[in-house]
Image: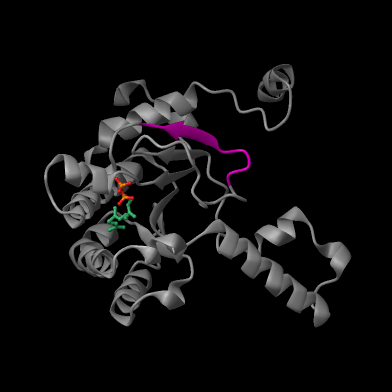
């Protein structure tokens, strides 16, 4: 399937809602945390393959603002898994020229998790290949409200004027400033929801849903999603004829 991928139309930014870890574990008669553990294995594989394919940004929804409401034991286990992931993967990330970034309300993270993420961000800061963006303690509504508050403060302090507020300016107040909007958003695990993820940024993103649980999601599943993406006509509100004409020039 990989050979069918058109190298000149690789999505620049792929975002993934990694769902189904819990159900995967339940099906195997295992504890939920084992689903997350196997999910980390999928993260490793998909990061490496995205890098090989020449994708520039891979954003993974690793922990939502709402996930703090899960049983404390599960939250602790996921936070510990992040630390373990950084410890095991740091050298691989550097070797593959992958730069780590975080988006979300990271001040809520336990110190140990935040420290290890920050160390990895530092150590990979000069990597120029794939940008791996982990969304942790992230939700779109939180991000949009924070941006609105900051814009209000800047207007009050005469840093910007009300009539300067445009979509472009608003985007620059989001945690994703300097990151292009996603071209392709994949959700695993069989649900058809956006779940408070990159709602502003995905206005024109192609959506792809699969029943595959995240711990089973492998390179060939990513290839399938990219091939599906490549079969779509992205019109951004224009007509099909206009797009054809634009591509001719
Ligand atoms: C959703 O599945 C998954 C999460 C809330 C956690 C995602 C975490 C990982 C994949 C662990 C590793 C991540 C990194 C970046 C190392 P769910 O628990 O909601 O599944 P369910 O809907 O089947 O219950």
Image quarter where the C terminus lies is top right
153 relative to 137 in the view: left or right: right
Residue 24 against residue 88 in the figure, above or below: above
Indicate whether residue 209 is drawn in magenta: yes
- Asked if residue 238 lies left or right of residue 42, the reply is right
Q: Residue at x 39, y 42 (%)?
A: 54
- Which percent across, then down, holds residue 110? 33, 78
Looking at the image, which residue is at 49% across and 49% down? Answer: 195
Q: Position of residue 167 (x, y in %)?
A: 74, 54
User: How has the structure been colored for display?
Assistant: one colour
Q: Which residues are magenta?
A: 202-210
Left or right of 234: which side holds 169? right
Observer-nearest of 98 and 186: 186
240 sits to left or right of 164 = left
Quadrant in the rendering for residue 10 = top left
Residue 236 coordinates in the image, percent (x, y): 68, 33
Asked if residue 178 shows in the view, the reply is no
> Which residue is at 20% across, 53% downward?
32
Residue extending furthest left? 29
Judge whether 164 appears above or below 12 on screen.
below
Decide which of 106, 238 is in the foreground and name it: 106
- Quadrant housing residue 153: bottom right
Please tell me which residue lies in front, 246 or 118: 118
Instruction: Give how far across and how far down residue 150 sits, in percent.
Output: 69, 74
- Report the residue at 66% width, 24% height from top: 247
Q: Is residue 96 magenta?
A: no
Residue placed furthest toward the right: 163
Residue 59 visible in the picture: yes
Rendered-image quadrant of the N terminus: top left
Report the number of numbered marks. 0
């Amino acid at each position: 399937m990989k050979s069918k991928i058109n190298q000149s139309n690789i999505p620049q930014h792929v975002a993934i809602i990694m769902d189904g870890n819990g159900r995967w574990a339940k099906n195997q008669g295992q504890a939920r945390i084992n689903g997350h553990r196997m999910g980390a294995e999928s993260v490793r594989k998909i990061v490496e393959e995205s890098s090989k394919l020449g994708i520039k940004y891979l954003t993974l929804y690793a922990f939502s603002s709402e996930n703090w409401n899960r049983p404390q034991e599960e939250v602790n286990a996921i936070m510990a898994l992040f630390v373990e992931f950084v410890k095991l993967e740091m050298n691989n990330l550097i070797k593959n020229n992958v730069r780590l970034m975080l988006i979300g309300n990271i001040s809520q993270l336990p110190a140990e998790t935040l420290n290890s993420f920050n160390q990895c961000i530092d150590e990979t800061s000069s990597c120029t290949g794939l940008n791996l963006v982990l969304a942790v303690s992230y939700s779109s509504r939180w991000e949009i409200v924070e941006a609105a508050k900051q814009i209000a403060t800047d207007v009050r302090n005469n840093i910007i004027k009300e009539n300067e507020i445009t979509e472009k300016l608003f985007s620059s107040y989001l945690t994703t400033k300097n990151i292009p909007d996603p071209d392709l958003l994949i959700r695993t695990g069989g649900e058809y929801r956006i779940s408070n993820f990159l709602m502003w940024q995905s206005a024109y993103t192609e959506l792809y849903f699969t029943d595959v649980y995240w711990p089973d999601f492998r390179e060939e599943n990513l290839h399938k999603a990219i091939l599906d993406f490549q079969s779509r006509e992205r019109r951004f509100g224009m007509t099909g004829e206009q797009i054809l004409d634009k591509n001719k020039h």
